[in-house]
């Protein structure tokens, strides 16, 4: 049996470091900060053309692969394993006959309605026919008309423009009906999606933008994951620098199931106060997140990703010309659209949810989410 080598020992120690919560901190795709096992300090591990380089004595003076590099490699391997096993939201298929529960079914034409067709099925055992319209029961419009209206609205059209489009398709509804669809299904989807835990990175960003609610100036605060651009939480408040944004911080931590290793924001005091009360910990082994407040557009630390998301919301707000109430479903609906349905160029055509390990499948992703939300009520 081979005697353990020095490399085996370092690999073992690297595994011990990687298993300690918060001891391997991701700074960027090519840079990590790894906590020392013996000293109260961190070593910098950087990716170079020749491999990983660490600032510890083993790497600098002995030119050897150190335990901190092993810890980073193990952390990357674990992240890749998680990324290969995403949560899959699949289209809902009819599982059995609604009369005898038999799974021996076949398609049996389409039931025609004023708003479109609904698939019918026939049971091969009891010979009875039926149609299933999961999530859209007692709706006069077809599911396709409703999901088309939602897609048009959240990509920039007004309620009245959506109404005009539907009329061209033979669906005669009012703009008020379109608004009611948005309210109903945003609430349904939100209740379902909030139960899913995205796989987020170690750095989060937060910022605010102003908007009008009933003609009065308000501020929309938002929290976003830096790595996946997943919009984690939001809050509407009266003031920019003095409003208590701790509810948004608590919602983000609960949604992600963890705290970040770093928080990036501007110099507003309410962000720092919420960080201090909700994220910072004076006791225990878990390292408190860093709060990076010195950000500049032309500096090494900036908030451009957050500003890009603010631009999305600003472009959408110009169409609906302000909100009627602070808890409007429109903002939550756009958060769902941003996370689960809008491909991002910065993510190579993926959605933030896909990068965060949640994949929505099917040709009509709105319908997939709505049907799964209705099924799991």
Image (cartoon, rainbow, N blue to C red):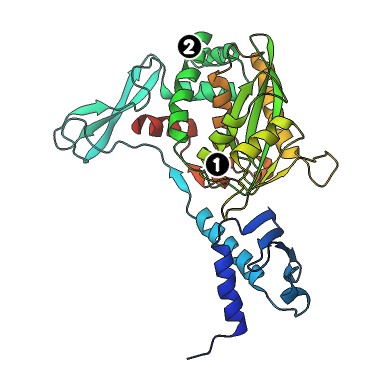
Mark 1 against mark 2, which lies toward the viewer? 1
Q: Earlier in the sequence, mark 1 or mark 2?
A: 2
For the question of whether residue 364 can be seen, the reply is no
Question: Looking at this rendering, what residue extends furthest in the right direction?
Answer: 298
Answer left or right for 362 relative to 342: left
Residue 113 x/y as whole percent: 35, 16
For the question of whether residue 216 can be seen, the reply is yes
Q: Residues within 10 Å of mark 2 (few under 14, many from 20)?
A: some
Residue 14 x/y as whole percent: 59, 70
User: Is residue 68 placed above or below 328 in the rendered structure?
Assistant: below
Give the residue displayed 57% in from the left and 80% down from the top. Answer: 8
Q: Judge by depth and name the residue closer to the eye, 233 or 316.
A: 233
- SS assignment at label 1: helix
Q: Which residue is mark 1?
A: 353
- SS assignment at label 2: helix
Question: Quarter holding the C terminus?
Answer: top left
């Amino acid at each position: 049996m081979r005697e353990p080598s020095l490399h085996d020992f370092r690999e073992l120690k690297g595994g011990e470091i990687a298993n300690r919560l918060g001891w391997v901190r991701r700074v960027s795709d090519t840079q990590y900060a790894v906590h020392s096992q013996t000293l109260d300090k961190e070593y910098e591990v950087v990716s170079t053309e020749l491999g990983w380089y660490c600032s510890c004595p083993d790497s600098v003076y002995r030119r050897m692969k150190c335990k901190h590099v092993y810890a980073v490699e193990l952390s990357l391997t674990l992240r890749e394993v998680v990324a290969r096993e995403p949560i899959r939201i699949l289209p809902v298929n009819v599982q059995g006959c609604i009369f005898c529960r038999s799974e021996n079914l076949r398609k049996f034409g389409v039931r025609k309605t004023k708003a479109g067709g609904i698939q019918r099925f026939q049971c091969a055992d009891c010979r009875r026919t039926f149609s299933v319209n999961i999530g859209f029961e007692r709706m006069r419009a077809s599911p396709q008309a409703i999901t088309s209206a939602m897609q048009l609205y959240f990509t920039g059209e007004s309620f009245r423009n959506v109404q005009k489009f539907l009329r061209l398709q033979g669906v005669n509804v009012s703009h008020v009906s379109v608004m009611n669809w948005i309210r109903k299904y945003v609430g349904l989807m939100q209740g379902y999606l909030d139960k899913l835990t995205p796989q987020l990175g170690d750095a989060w960003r937060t910022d605010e933008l102003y908007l009008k609610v009933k003609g009065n100036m308000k501020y929309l605060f938002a929290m976003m994951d830096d790595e996946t651009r997943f919009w984690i939480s939001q809050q509407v408040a009266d003031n920019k620098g003095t409003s208590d944004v701790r509810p948004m911080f608590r919602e983000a931590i609960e949604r992600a199931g963890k705290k970040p290793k770093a928080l990036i924001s501007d110099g507003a005091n309410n962000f720092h106060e919420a960080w201090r009360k909700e994220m910072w910990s004076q006791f225990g082994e878990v390292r408190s997140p860093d709060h990076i407040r010195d950000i500049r557009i032309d500096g090494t630390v900036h908030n451009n990703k957050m500003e890009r998301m603010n631009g999305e919301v600003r472009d959408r707000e110009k169409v609906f010309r302000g909100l009627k109430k602070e808890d409007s479903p429109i903002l939550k609906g756009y958060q769902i659209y941003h996370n689960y349905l809008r491909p991002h160029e910065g993510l190579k055509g993926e959605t933030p949810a896909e990068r965060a390990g949640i994949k929505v499948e099917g040709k009509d992703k709105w319908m997939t989410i709505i049907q799964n939300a209705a099924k799991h009520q």
